[in-house]
Amino acid sequence: MSTRYHGTMAFRSGNGAAWLDLMSTLSGRYHGQRVDAIDSVESLRAWLREFGLEPVGAVTSDDVTLTLETRELLHRLAVAAVRGTRPAPADVRRLNAVLDLDAGLHVAAGETALRPRRPASVADALARLARAAVTDLSGHGPGTLRACGDDTCSSIFLDLSGRRRWCTDLSCGNRTRVRAHRQRVSS
């Protein structure tokens, strides 16, 4: 996982899919002070731009609300998938409502290859993220969804190797190993 800086905004990435990186825009979800990287129209537009989803249309405060609601919906669904539990029927209905916002994926000819056209709106961008989430949540994606092994981290990532334990070895892995070492030394 890496952190990308946009002015004063920092976005975590490296969870294996953009929809999982969206969930990482809220840190401190389980412990500590919550810090939301998407707290304004500007930060939402910057996040969407970073992940190739900047819409053609305007980004509004209602879009920020919709994005945060969708992020939390995807988090609840990912937690259910990781735990192997049935998702809440209300969450499945809400996911279908987000998918209904999909304006369809169209392509344009780039310099050397096809490229997807920009989403028409934030709702369209969120529908694209939801479509990718469905693939991973249904077990038809390229890897397995896993929760970070650091119990203070709320990240869920796509494990392509079958061996990953942490969202990032450099922060969560080190933090977990240091805590374990300190506990052994103090015992």
Image: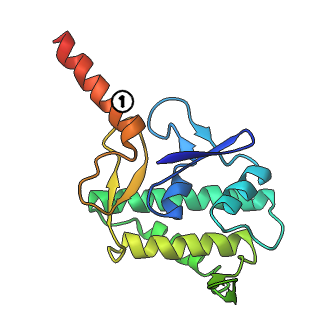
Residue located at (39% from left, 71% from top): 136
- Nearest the viewer among 32 and 109 is 109
Q: Is 65 placed left or right of 138 in the picture?
A: right
Residue located at (57% from left, 78% from top): 99
- Nearest the viewer among 112 and 43 is 112
Circle 1: element type:
helix
Residue 93 shows in the view:
no
Q: Is 107 placed left or right of 147 in the picture?
A: right
> Residue pushed farthest front?
112
- Nearest the viewer among 93 and 155 is 155
Q: Is 134 placed left or right of 65 in the picture?
A: left
Residue 77 image-quadrant placement: bottom left
Residue 52 shows in the view:
yes
Is 26 rendered above or below residue 179? below
Q: Where is residue 129 in the image (x, y as percent from the top left)?
A: 56, 70
> Which residue type does callout 1 highlight?
Arg
Q: Residue under circle 1?
A: 175
Quadrant in which the C terminus is drawn: top left
Is 187 rendered above or below residue 153? above
Q: Where is residue 142 in the image (x, y as percent from the top left)?
A: 35, 72
Q: How is the image coloured?
A: rainbow
Residue located at (71% from left, 76% from top): 119
- Total marks placed: 1
Residue 115 image-quadrant placement: bottom right
Is 162 rendered above or below residue 113? above
